[in-house]
Amino acid sequence: MNININGEAVETSTPDILSLVRARNLDPSSLVVEHNHTIIQQAAWADTLLQQGDTIELLSFVGGG
């Protein structure tokens, strides 16, 4: 299926947000996920299914000083 991740069209076979995060080797502890303009709590990632045309924003927090 085709989805948009951070403004880029991407082909994926991952069924849910948790699988998508794992497939992209991202650190869940510093990640916020927005699915179709709604922030998804980390506890719901495995239950949030992806569908054709979905928009995903993957936002990482980086500390600094």
Image (cartoon, rainbow, N blue to C red):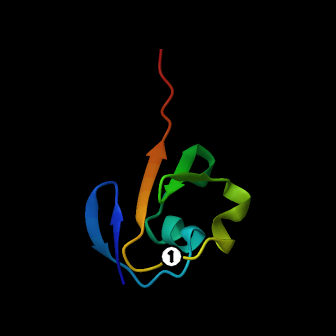
* Direction left: furthest residue: 8
Q: Is residue 2 above or below residue 64?
A: below
Name the residue nearer the viewer: 14 or 35. 35
**Residue type, mark 1 in image:** Leu
Name the residue nearer the viewer: 23 or 15. 15
Determine the residue positioned at 64% across, 65% down: 45
49 horizontally vs 52: left or right:
right
Image quadrant in which the N terminus is located:
bottom left
Name the residue nearer the viewer: 53 or 12. 53
Determine the residue positioned at 26% across, 68% down: 9
- The image shows a total of numbered marks equal to 1
Q: Which residue is mark 1?
A: 50
Q: Secondary structure at mark 1?
A: loop
* Direction right: furthest residue: 43
Q: Is residue 56 above or below residue 47?
A: above
Question: Dot 1: few (<14), some (14–19), or many (≥20) neighbours within 10 Å?
Answer: many
Determine the residue positioned at 67% across, 56% down: 42
Q: Is residue 27 above or below residue 16?
A: above
Determine the residue positioned at 29% across, 72% down: 10
34 horizontally vs 12: left or right:
right
Q: Quadrant of residue 4?
A: bottom left
x%, y% of residue 7? 28, 56
